[in-house]
Image: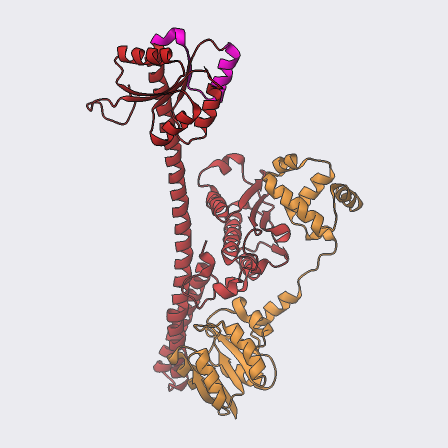
Amino acid sequence: MIHVVLCDDHAVLRRGIRDTLVESPDITVTAEAGSYPELRDALRTAACDVLLLDLNLPGRSGLEVLASLRDTHPQIRVLIVSMYPEDQYALRAIRAGAQGYANKASDPLQLIAAVHTVMQGRKYLTPEVAQLLADSLAQPVPELPHEQLSERELQTLVKIASGRRLSDIAEELMLSPKTVSVYRARVLEKLKLSNNAELTVYAIRNQLV
Amino acid sequence: MIPNNADPETPKRPVRVLHLEDSPADQALVRMTLRRARVPHEIRQVDSLPALARCLDSETFDVIVADYRLTGFTAIDAWQLVSGRAGHPPFVLLSGAIGEAAAVDAMRLGFADYLLKDDMARLPHVIERALEVAEARRAREQAMADLAESEQRLADLAEHLQTSIEEERAAIAREIHDDIGGALTAARFDLAWIGRHAPQGPLGEHAGAASEMLEHAIDASQRIMMNLRPPVLDQGLVAAVQWLAETFERRTRLPVRVSCDCKAIDSAPPALQLVAYRTAQEALTNIHKHAGATQVRIDLSDHEGVLTVEVCDDGRGIAPEMLKKPRSFGLKGLAERARRAGGWMDVSSQPGRGTAIVLSLPLVGLPSAGSPLTDSAAPTQLNEGGAEP
């Protein structure tokens, strides 16, 4: 038997979730909580294999509650059930230790599948979350230091290397002189250079001018 | 004669003259000249700097008339004593010949006028003119002060409106999430239950149809909530801008590259992060509507103590005359918002060569370890902490 605890501030919604879950003969709901303090009390007495947790209850941040649950009840598998679409919270919740993220707006029966999945020790990922995870892995890493520069930072670099004065650069790039001087300082820092001469050498070596 | 606010029917207030002169004969001459000219006046005559200072401390005067050379000091010393006082009366030199150079110097310092004692008859006229000029200057200063105050009030109002808008948005988004969204979802669970337990036939079909409608309603409420204030904002600027770029890309099929070279951008004050987010959002909207771009780049950085958001496209650019239009692209509003947040915004664009919107917000001088958005603008609060100025 899988022991499930529900934590959500809408009583009617909890009943809806409970009535859906118990249609699976191997699931029993052992406790319900309408707030995080109630959840703490419930977990003292009720058996809990899987916790269905809403991230956005009044009071503490749900992610903090999730993190502290990982310390106090490491054996509980946490399934986040949220009103928010996956792209808002899912990755963060999974990084904070949740075993899955389900959107309340999706098919109720998916919750049963989710409980079974996490009970088997696997992560429950909707196709949307899986896509987000894949995208987050595919961030390209810039190869050359100056590829970290923004468009206008790069142009500032090129113009300094060509010997332009800051005020002329500001005028040519239609930036305020303040912005140009921030950009110059930032370019030097990002490229680990210390003055305009080194900057010019860098620009020539990398064929930017 | 007194160009005062008093309306024309009321009798004229006498001119209060402070006369700095150490020759009793000349003192008498000035008194007589003013009496003869039938100028209503009160005159106080002193012959030393301490006496001058005492008079200025205890009374107010409309005009100071002073000889140039007095025993042990000159009118320049007297001027230094007077000119340090805010709103001091006009200072007229009434003196024997002092030479052109000294007279020019005196006028440069700010003396109202210079009159030779030989020309004493013109004194009433000179005083009148000095009073008029002083009054005009006072009026101008007052007008400038009123204008500055009015501008400040306007800026305060704009700021208040902005804050109210952000607070309202957060509150509405919150209500949609808590009440509408919760209720719709709960109803959907029950309808799905009815659908599963209904016997074959119309009951199940109706439950299914109703369930579908609810799904639409839930989608709509989520969309409205996102547009009002995406909850991802609570995870900090980088997450929010990345999400903004992804949804923009999906909606417009325009590739957006976000690069973030940050040290601790998410610990910048929430109010600044919100300004940065709204600027990026508005810039993307402009690009979609006007730019005809093929790619977009967003750079976030907080190096050198300045939070910078640079939104760059390769579109048709903004012509200079378009930029001058008062309502052009909502850029004025963004620039104003940047200014109120202590920063500035550049619009760098040339026709045919793309546009870059660059927002710079200095972080130095602020309480450095500002709470991240998650702390003070948690979605559990009704008012968005991030909207506080």
Figure check: B101 above or below B355: above
Q: Is residue B232 visible?
A: no
* Residue displayed at 22% across by 22% down: B8
Q: How is the image coloured?
A: by chain
Does the magenta-highlighted stretch encompass residue B358? no
Q: Quadrant of residue B196?
A: bottom left
The chain in red: B
Give the image location of residue A196, x and y in percent: 74, 41
Instruction: Indicate the colour of chain A.
Output: orange
Q: Quadrant of residue B367?
A: bottom right
* Quarter of the image where the N terminus of chain B is located: top left
On the picture, is B243 further left or further right than B166? right
On the picture, is B220 further left or further right than B257? left
* Residue displayed at 52% across by 93% down: A1
> Which residue in the rendered view is the most extreme toward the left?
B9
Give the image location of residue A44, x and y in percent: 49, 88
Give the image location of residue B14, x and y in percent: 26, 21
Magenta range is B99-121
Figure check: B146 above or below B28: below
Residue closer to the observer: B361 or B172? B361
Figure check: A68 above or below B172: below
Give the image location of residue A150, x and y in percent: 65, 49
Task: Report the label total.
Answer: 0
Does the magenta stretch mainly form a helix, a strand or a loop? helix
